[in-house]
Amino acid sequence: MQEHFYKYTDIRTAELILDNQSFRFSSPLKFNDPFDIQNDLAPSFDLNDFPVIAMSMIEEYINNDYPISNPEDGFAKAILSMRSCVKTQGYKKADIERITYPLLGHLMGEVEYLISQVNAHWQKSMKDSRVFCVTEDNDNLLMWAHYAENHTGVVFELAAMPEADTPLSVARKVKYTDKPLGFYSLEDLVKWTLFGIEPDASILQYSNHAYRKSSVWSYENEWRVVDMCYYERKQDLFVDHKFIPKQLRKVFFGCKSDEDNIRRLSNKAKEINRDVEIYRARKMQHDYALQFEKI
């Protein structure tokens, strides 16, 4: 677990943070990356293949003694009956298809409904969740340029303080991948609808997607706090959480920060925590890097 994290901000946001002694947790719908959590859980299969996959699996269950979770279900009864016939007198594939095909249309409808319900829940979760993003690094040149307004802004060092049960104490590291997580496979859905074998629930677990981003963002070394609490003003798509004064350990000003801003915000930071340390970034002369001097 990280002992502390860094938050990059422009100067205006930094002043609001200090004035209100709070950080903003935002809905994914406000993220700058439209692929960040905001993808629909689109199946990677063609639902028209359902009958073929289903028939193959039904034959497998008829010809083998696989356990069936709900033997009283009408479809399960048909399979058990055909399994019994296979053992005593054999069963032609055409007979199996004649019995099962009329039922598959209904099952395909169930799958379509499931997909629509999952995505409706997903859209609701994006509106309901609030995410706070931080990083491990305070010297990332790209982040100073993007999030700290061309090196004129601020980076706050924040202590996690697990002993105080702060939101940052439950921050999780973002996983960077080349592809987003997908939906259940068609085989998973066939087993679920035919035999009641539920797929791995974690595949669609919101938190698994909330802590995952495209590999192109890996330079950020991001950590996140995902808040799924109930808020009355959901239309705002954000909520502000107070932080403990001692969490504010250090304030880093950019190498292009204005002197008046440095002086004003330094005073505000010391009003929150008199032990806070103030630094200013300087460009290194022989490297593409920053160094920080205490002021």
Image (cartoon, rainbow, N blue to C red):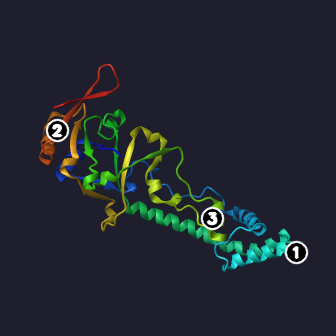
- Residue 54 position within the rendered picture, expressed as x and y whole percent measured from the top left: 71, 66
Q: Secondary structure at mark 3?
A: helix
| Crowd band around label 3 with a 10 angstrom C-alpha radius: few (<14), some (14–19), many (20+) | many
Residue, far right: 89
Distance in Å between CA atoms under marks 1 and 2: 88 Å
Where is mark 2, residue-wise? Answer: 261
Lower sequence index among marks 2 and 3: 3
Residue at (43, 54) in percent of width and height: 210
User: Mark 1, residues whose alpha carbon is within 10 Å: few (<14), some, or many (≥20)?
Assistant: few
Q: Are the two marked residues, 1 and 3, in contact with CB atoms closer than 8 angstroms?
A: no
| Callout 1 secondary element | loop
**Label 1 or label 2, whichever comes before in sequence order:** 1
Disc 2/disc 3 C-alpha distance (Å): 58 Å
The three-letter amino acid code for the residue at tag 1 is Gln
Residue occupying image coordinates x 46% and y 59%: 206
Left or right placement of residue 80 versus residue 282 in this view: right
Q: Are marks 1 and 2 in contact (CB under 8 Å)?
A: no
Expressed as whole percent of the image width and height from the top left, the position of residue 108 reads 65, 69
In the picture, the quarter occupied by the C terminus is: top left
Q: Quadrant of residue 58?
A: bottom right
Which residue in the structure is indicated by mark 1?
A: 89
**Of the residues under marks 1 and 3, which one precedes in the sequence?**
1
The residue that label 3 is drawn on is: 189
Q: Nearer the viewer, mark 2 or mark 3?
A: 3
Image quadrant of residue 107? bottom right
In the depicted view, which residue is nearer to us: 79 or 122?
A: 79
At which x and y percent is residue 32?
39, 48
Q: Is residue 267 above or below residue 209?
A: above
